[in-house]
Image: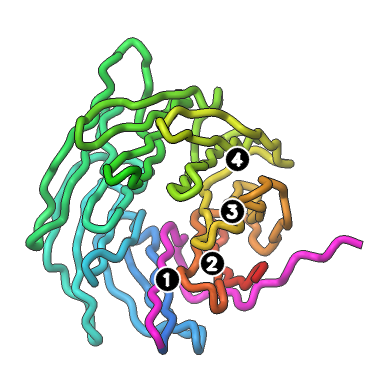
Amino acid sequence: MPVPPPAPLFVFRGDTNEVHSLLFHETSDKLTLYTGSTDGTVHIWDLMTNKKISSFKTGTLTCLALHFMDFNLLTQDKSCHLKVWTLKEDSPSCMYEKKFNNFSFCKINVLRNKLAIPQPNSMTEIHEYVSSSICRIARLSYPDESMKLGEVQQLKLFDHKSSLFTAIVYENGSLAIWDVDKSEVVSNFKITSATPMAFDFDEEKLQGVCGSNEKDVVFFKVDEQLQLTKIKEIEITNAGVGCLRIRPDRKVLAAGCWDGKVRIFSWKTCKLLAVLDCHKASILDVTFTFSNQPSMMVASASDKKISLWNIYE
């Protein structure tokens, strides 16, 4: 008999809005969860008691992404308005903000103090957060306009051989690897014929995954010269993958799907391990803790619920 999928540890129902962004905050004695909502509110939850600690408004638009940067909190709204917040006990305060005015559902990506920010017309800008300000260090604009790439859908910064690179997935299904220092395309590949909706990349194994508005989940490899090769394509039961997240220990992959299910894959074999069925609407975000003692996963969905899981130690 197959092992039944686990049940969630807890289901949060304290927010009356959809949650589009999730972020764990781990210290030696405390685990908290930050959730960003459609109305621009960030709620902070104590995962020892599973109760809300506090909340604060980042603006009036959807809080699309949350990141920690230099011990501060970075928020992104739907218009790509970025704000940096100091995390005080009483209430966070905004110490810096910058508007990019790009209405998109593409989330920025952060690596240390570097930010990859989607821009209109297939463009991506790389910025650096230094001295409490965000400054552009590179602009990645595809040289061949005849390719009709469409808008930037997903992106991921990564290090390789002491240099900074960015993997960018475009609306037409193309995946490009960029050398940030040279602002040059190193390689490109047609990863899917559908519209890409989700993406993640493992810089240690040089392996990535892409999901779309259709049923395909595509796994690919990158060689030492950063050339791309598709290694496997898996068809799931129902169309639509909204988010993908590789667990930090690189053992499993979580795919948040439009049918309300979170599908767990082995990152080594790409084999489907379990289907977590807790939500009744599209999964909006999924993330893991960085620590493996124990490893926790959280998912949010359009049903306005947030589920907390402990899977596959």
Is label 3 in a helix, a strand or a loop? strand
In the rendered image, residue 17, in percent from the top left (x then y), is placed at: 45, 64
Q: Earlier in the sequence, mark 2 or mark 3?
A: 3
Q: In which quarter of the image is the N terminus?
A: bottom right
Q: Which amino acid does label 1 sit on?
A: Phe
Q: Are marks 3 and 1 in contact (CB under 8 Å)?
A: no
Please report the residue visible at 58 percent of the width from the left and 30 percent of the height from the top: 230
Q: What residue type is labelled 3?
A: Leu
Q: Earlier in the sequence, mark 4 or mark 1?
A: 1
Q: Which amino acid does label 2 sit on?
A: Val
Q: How crowded is mark 2: few (under 14 residues within 10 Å), some or many (20 or more)?
A: many
Q: Are marks 1 and 2 in contact (CB under 8 Å)?
A: yes
Dot 2 corresponds to which residue? 298
Q: How crowded is mark 1: few (under 14 residues within 10 Å), some or many (20 or more)?
A: many
Q: Where are the magenta residues, as a range?
A: 1-28
Q: Do the residues labelled 4 and 1 touch (CB within 8 Å)?
A: no
Q: Quadrant of the C terminus?
A: bottom right
* Vertical order, 313 against 113 (above or below): below
Q: Earlier in the sequence, mark 4 or mark 3?
A: 4
Label 3, label 1: how far apart the Cα atoms are: 17 Å
Is label 4 in a helix, a strand or a loop? loop
